[in-house]
Image (spheres, rainbow, N blue to C red):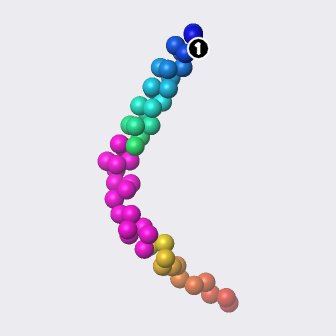
Amino acid sequence: MSMFTLLWPISIILGLIGLAAFFWSLRSGQYGDSAGDAQRILYDEDAPLDKD
């Protein structure tokens, strides 16, 4: 039982850290343009290398 009293606060703290990281990523715009990201991966914008 003493291990349970040690583990539940740790799990609550880790869950709150994960939730805070998720809200931070929402606020910083990480999920802002998912359709643009899906289209951008299809096109190659790099210039071809010269074979001289």
In the current view of this chain or complex, which residue is farthest to the right? 52
Q: Relative to 6, is 52 above or below?
A: below
Given residues 22 and 48, the one toward you in this image is 22
Q: Position of residue 25 (x, y in %)?
A: 38, 47
Q: Relative to 18, is 26 on the left or the right?
A: left
Q: Position of residue 43 (x, y in %)?
A: 48, 79
Given residues 26 and 28, the one toward you in this image is 26
Residue 35 located within the stretch drawn in magenta = yes
Given residues 45 and 17, the one toward you in this image is 17
Question: Could you tell me which residue is drawn at 31 percent across and 47 percent down?
Answer: 27
| Residue that badge 1 annotates | 3
In the current view of this chain or complex, which residue is farthest to the front? 1
Instruction: Rate crowding at label 1 as few (under 14), some (14 to 19) or many (20 or more) other CA atoms within 10 Å.
Output: few
Q: Position of residue 18 (x, y in %)?
A: 44, 37
Q: Relative to 3, is 11 on the left or the right?
A: left
Q: Which image quarter is the N terminus in? A: top right
Q: Position of residue 39 (x, y in %)?
A: 42, 74
Predominant SS of the magenta segment = helix
Residue type for callout 1: Met
Question: Could you tell me which residue is drawn at 50 percent across and 20 percent down?
Answer: 8
Question: Could you tell me which residue is drawn at 53 percent across and 82 percent down?
Answer: 47
Q: Relative to 52, is 41 above or below?
A: above
Q: Which residues are magenta?
A: 23-39
In the current view of this chain or complex, which residue is farthest to the bottom? 52
Quadrant assignment, res 6: top right
Residue 28 located within the stretch drawn in magenta = yes
Given residues 37 and 6, the one toward you in this image is 6
- For mark 1, give the secondary structure: helix
Count of marks, rendered view: 1
Question: Could you tell me which residue is drawn at 51 percent across and 79 percent down?
Answer: 44
